[in-house]
């Protein structure tokens, strides 16, 4: 559940297959929302970048989600620039209560710079 966030379905469909990154300039695609995309690159608004970074990096670390090295560097920077909020920590607590596993990058964002080896899940 650590990678699940509500989204705007029209936007999610339109952006399917794009990679997160930073887009030059400030060409907002929606009037009041700092959200941009160009070619195959999408730039979320600054207040969401840390959440996205920790969720994607968790999936990369825990389940071997393939991420290209330039994206990993971007995610690490976003993690440093936008630390976990109280809401994100509360969400981490709730997910642990439901699925029994925390996102350690929310508890300790510095781990993204030197992640531990992922624990193997039991097959029971």
Image (cartoon, helix red, strand yellow):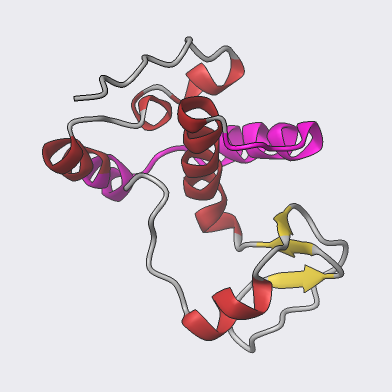
- Left or right: where does residue 48 sit relative to residue 15? left
Q: In the image, residue 20 lies at what x, y percent?
A: 69, 54
Q: In the image, residue 79 lies at what x, y percent?
A: 56, 36
Task: Please give the name of the residue rendered at 47% of the width and 37% of the height, measured from the top-left corner.
Answer: 83
- Left or right: where does residue 118 sit relative to residue 14? left
- Picture quadrant where residue 71 is located: top right
Rendered-image quadrant of the C terminus? top left
Q: In the image, residue 99 lies at what x, y percent?
A: 19, 39
Residue segment shown in magenta: 65-91
The one nearer the camera, 95 or 81, is 95
Query: Is 81 contained in the magenta span?
Result: yes
Task: Please give the name of the residue rendered at 70% of the width and 63% of the height, measured from the top-left corner.
Answer: 17
The one nearer the camera, 102 or 35, is 102
- Picture quadrant where residue 38 is located: bottom right
> Main structural element of the magenta stretch: helix, strand or loop?
helix
Q: In the image, residue 34 lies at what x, y percent?
A: 64, 72
Question: Please, which residue is most extreme toward the left here?
Answer: 97
From this view, report whether residue 106 is shown above or below residue 56: above
From this view, report whether residue 38 is shown above or below residue 10: above
């Amino acid at each position: 559940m650590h990678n699940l966030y509500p989204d705007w379905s029209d936007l999610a469909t339109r952006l399917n297959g794009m990679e997160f990154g930073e887009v030059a300039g400030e060409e907002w695609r929606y009037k009041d929302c700092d959200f941009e995309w160009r070619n195959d690159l999408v730039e979320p608004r600054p207040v969401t970048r840390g959440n996205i970074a920790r969720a994607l990096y968790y999936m990369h670390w825990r389940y071997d989600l393939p991420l290209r090295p330039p994206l990993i560097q971007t995610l690490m920077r976003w993690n440093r620039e936008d630390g976990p909020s109280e809401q994100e920590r509360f969400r981490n607590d709730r997910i642990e209560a439901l699925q029994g596993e925390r996102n350690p990058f929310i508890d300790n964002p510095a781990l993204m710079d030197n992640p531990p080896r992922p624990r193997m899940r039991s097959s029971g």
